[in-house]
Amino acid sequence: MASSNHIARILRHVLSLSLPPLVGACGGINTDDFEPVACGADGQTEYLAGVKPKDLADYVELRRLGDQIGGGPSAVDSTGTKCANATDKAACEAKLAAVAADKGFLVGDCADVCMHHVLIVNTGDEVQVLGTKEEVIAWLGPVDAPADAVLVASLGGYSVACNQPDLGGVRTAGSSYEVLGTSYTSTCSPIEEKLFVLGVSGDGKLTEVDSEVINADSGACIGRRPAGLLQSGGRGTNAVGAYFANVARLEAASVYAFEALEEELLHHGAPAELVERARMARQDEVRHARVMQRVSARHGGRFEEPRVEKKPVRSLEEIAIENAAEGCVRETFGALVGMWQAEFARDLDVRRVMKHIAEDEARHAELSWAVDAWARQRLSPEAWERVEEARREALAEIEAEAERGYDDGLVEIAGMPGQAAAVRLARHFAQAIGQA
């Protein structure tokens, strides 16, 4: 696990080894003939690249509206040049900047905080705002390009993954197209995520051609704990509420952890990319804490702000030791446990929260392993052995916690693994990082 670029893939593999087998499963969808969908510069699916609408435009932008957790409007994807053929360019750009909408449409599979979008089309001096999926499909016109079909499938509530051939792709099917996409379909425990082959006709009609249940590709758990965190347990009217109150507190504490990591990486001359990723992770944790506070309150939990004593900048060895235990082991294993929760929690909201946070937490785990690789090059063999010892100790603690198991209410409602499942997860996880 020295390479940090495939953490999510490794965790999915560990989860698949630990899940109970599906009864009666056979066959499956052959994804070999599907062309993968390319990712944009931000690593997300591009919805507009290659789209061929019936009427050409100077500029098209897919804009996400403000969400329920405080995020403002932002451009998800765009193509063309703003106001390229406008007679009054300044006025045209002002119109684009001033676009506002009370409602919009969903793109992809909705989970937890459902992000609504609008499509903004600029031709000459005109700025048009499309706020429903029907309006977007009408603007698109005949579906005569692979990207058109991917957009239609995404508007239909299916997630089309980019650069993941087994989870997202497109192929021609006569005069129509077929798109490979995923969606969460179950509303009771255990949750089901399905892979679909979706037929997209020339007039934009969407049908499900084939499907199969796949392992959930989602999840997150408790984030990185900062040095100086003063211990206190979660409180609530019941064990589940207290658990989520503690999760919310620890997510909030992670804000301090990544703030410190950003400062210390900068102090020790880490690459700018690592510093920036730590800053972005801190912003993610602010959002995660807000969401988990809501979940906690709904289950009777009482959130308390974490108390963290400010520590001076530490030595590189101290940073590496903490990162090995808190990041490479606990944070990464936390993401794995979250995948399990997203699969088995009885509470639909819990599963959706885990799905929403999953990609962020996987990136945080990747950051931990990237910091680990960078620090290793700068530490002596003796210092590095102390880092490895901290990693081994953290793994041993996880295995001991797995043996103890969890409260029955947490297993049922929050989806925490039972004792046998927890032991399997811990064992396969240790094997995956080469410390079994």
Image (cartoon, grey):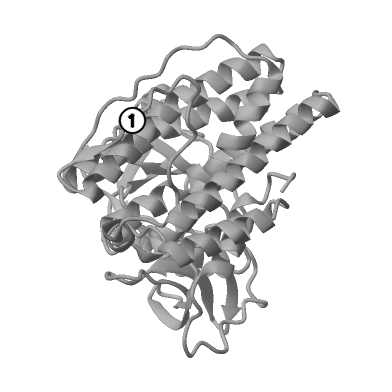
Residue visible at 31% across and 70% down in the picture: 189
Q: Residue 198 location, x and y as percent? A: 46, 76
Q: How many labels does the image show?
A: 1
Judged from the image, the secondary structure of the residue bearing numbered disc 1 is helix
Question: Looking at the image, is 330 positioned above or below residue 193?
Answer: above
Q: In which quarter of the image is residue 272?
A: top right
Front residue of this view, candidates 58 and 116: 116
Left or right of 3 in this view: 131: left
Question: Looking at the image, is 69 positioned above or below residue 424?
Answer: above
Residue at the extreme right: 381
Question: Looking at the image, is 71 positioned above or below residue 161?
Answer: above
Pointer 1: residues within 10 angstroms few (<14), some, or many (20+)?
A: some
Q: Residue 320 location, x and y as percent? A: 67, 27
Residue visible at 70% across and 36% down in the picture: 389
Q: Residue 64 location, x and y as percent? A: 37, 42
- Residue behind mark 1: 95
Left or right of 385 in this view: 204: left
Front residue of this view, candidates 413 and 367: 413
Front residue of this view, candidates 200 and 66: 66
Residue visible at 36% across and 69% down in the picture: 191
Q: Residue 234 location, x and y as percent? A: 28, 37
Front residue of this view, candidates 197 and 21: 21
Tell me if residue 67 can be seen: no
Quadrant where the C terminus lies? bottom right
Q: Quadrant of residue 229?
A: top left
Question: Looking at the image, is 330 positioned above or below residue 71?
Answer: below
Amino acid type of the residue tagged 1 in the rendering? Lys
Tell me if residue 104 can be seen: yes
Residue visible at 33% across and 30% down in the picture: 95
Left or right of 182 in this view: 106: left
